[in-house]
Amino acid sequence: MRIYIDYDDCLCETARYFSKLAAELFGKNIPYEKIRFFNLQKSFLLNDEEYRLLMTEGHKAERLLSYTETPGAVKTVNDWIDRGYEVFIITGRPYSSYEASRKWLDLHGLERANLYCLNKYSWDSFIKKDDFSLELEDYYKMTFDYAVEDSPSAFRFFDHLPDLKVLVFDRPWNKECEFPGENYIRCSGWEKINGIVDSEGNVQGENCPGKNGQKGNLPV
């Protein structure tokens, strides 16, 4: 089993932090529950200069390290890795934030998870001359069985995988989103996500020959 996981608002509560940061920097009091667009510039009604400042501040190492875990994320991901699943955390954060992002994962017990920075959202609009650790041409050579993602803007990165099951983490900004296909499933949290992945893992395990040629569970 190969699983793609988005970082922000799947593993940690990034938007909740940015909601507080926008209020702190600009007096924009838009609570998390009222964030209607993944584009925070649009959600917080910011001009270009304010948006660049918000994103630059929000990607500083000390801020990235302070983000809180999304409940159930760490335990679920570690359980998957224990079962032998390959986990790929693919974030739209620029590579300049890689070190802090990697440290956050390690501090939260996710040191075994792979981390890649992919230019999903053209962040060069606020961070100039930055790099990404995963090029699009290499990303499109990768395959996954499941993807955990919250951003409708990222759905286009799954077009090359017609059999991929996309587990959409329920967030205010995707409430009104029309999903591209029946393989997109809205999930209220990690408990539901784990239940869906686990059910297929058990089916595969039942059909996997054991040591004596009998059907058995996947090795853990």
Image: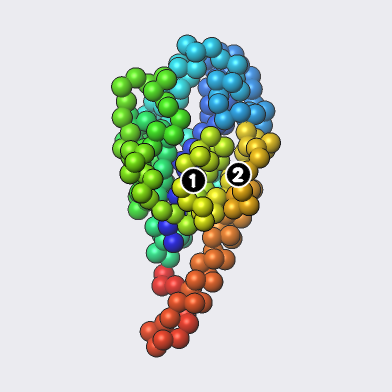
Quarter that holds the C terminus: bottom left
Residue at x-position 68% and y-position 36%: 176
Q: Which residue is mark 2?
A: 180
At x 31%, y 22%, the residue is 129
* Residue corresponding to mark 1: 158
The amino acid beneath tag 2 is Pro
Residue located farthest toward the bottom when viewing the structure as drawn: 212
Residue 220 relative to residue 76: left or right: left
Image quadrant in which the N terminus is located = bottom left
Label 1 crowd bin: few (<14), some (14–19), many (20+), radius 10 Å: some
Residue 152 position, x and y percent, is: 57, 37
Q: Is residue 54 above or below residue 168?
A: above
Q: What amino acid is found at the position of numbered circle 1 in the picture?
A: Phe
Asked if the residues shown at circle 1 and circle 2 are in contact, with their CB atoms under 8 angstroms apart, the answer is yes
Q: Is residue 84 above or below residue 190?
A: below
Q: Nearer the viewer, residue 161 or 194?
A: 161
Between the residue at mark 1 and the residue at mark 2, the CA separation in whole angstroms equals: 10 Å
Provide the secondary structure element on which disc 2 rests.
loop
Describe residue 140's horizontal placement relative to residue 48 as left or right. Answer: left
The foreground one among 163 and 105 is 163
Q: Secondary structure at mark 1?
A: helix
The location of residue 122, given as percent across then percent down, is: 42, 27
Give x and y (percent) for residue 52.
45, 17
Q: Residues within 10 Å of mark 2 (few under 14, many from 20)?
A: few
Give the mark nearer the N terminus: 1 vs 2.
Answer: 1
Q: How many marks?
A: 2
Residue 119 occupies quadrant:
top left
Q: Position of residue 206 (x, y in %)?
A: 51, 77
Coloring scheme used: rainbow
Q: Which mark is residue 96?
A: none
Q: Which residue is depicted at the point 60% across and 44% down?
A: 180
- Is there any visible trace of residue 19 in the rendered image? yes
